[in-house]
Amino acid sequence: MAKITLEQADTIINAALAKGKEAGMSPLSVAVLDDGGNIVAFKKSDNSSVLRFNIALGKASAAIGMHRPSRALEQVAKDRPHFAEALTAASGGKFVPVAGGSLIKDGDGTVIGSVGVTGDTSDNDEIAGLAGIAAAGLQGE
């Protein structure tokens, strides 16, 4: 089974940050996790706020933990708030169910990790993360 590499994680992060800068987004923070939910890399733009690490980690953790993009988990949280609260507790607070957390898949469609982006609107965070995944030659969901 393929594993996400540090080089791929760096590419994802740098491309996501570049996309944010190019699009005039607010300062972004980006976390990349492997398929086991372990952090591979993190980077933040200058002037990112203090909680951005936790939010990026929470979006990426939600995606990899539930094997679906954090955007889809937003609806789950609206429909079943008690379940979302339980997931937040079970994950030690690393469950942020809003857009910006995407799955990273290899060329065969196997999930090899996730990316969490925060700093702008959740929609823009997701756009930046998916751009980073594409720049690494991987598939995003």
Image (spheres, rainbow, N blue to C red):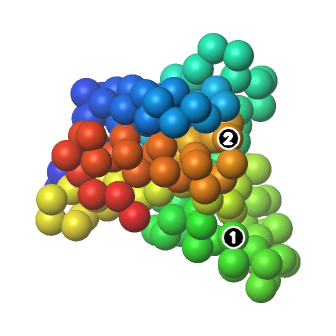
Kind of residue at badge 1: Glu
Q: Is residue 113 left or right of residue 136?
A: right
Q: How many marks?
A: 2
Q: Which mark is residue 10?
A: none
Vertical position of residue 54 compared to residue 123: above or below: above
Name the residue at 82% across, 68% down. Answer: 85
Residue 117 visible in the snapshot: yes
Name the residue at 18% across, 51% down. Answer: 2
Using the image as rendered, state which of residue 24 and residue 36 is in the foreground. Answer: 24
Q: Tag 1: Cα neighbours inside 10 Å, few (<14), some, or many (≥20)?
A: some
Q: Quadrant of residue 71?
A: bottom right
Name the residue at 46% across, 68% down. Answer: 67
Q: Quadrant of residue 16?
A: top left
Sooner in the amino-acid sequence: mark 1 or mark 2: 1
Label 2 sits on a secondary structure element that is: loop
Name the residue at 19% across, 46% down. Answer: 137
Kind of residue at badge 2: Asp
Q: Which mark is residue 74?
A: 1
Q: Is residue 118 left or right of residue 63?
A: right
Vertical position of residue 100 compared to residue 78: above or below: above
**Labels 1, 2: front one:** 2
Residue named by callout 2: 120
Q: Quadrant of residue 78?
A: bottom right
Q: Tag 2: Cα neighbours inside 10 Å, few (<14), some, or many (≥20)?
A: some
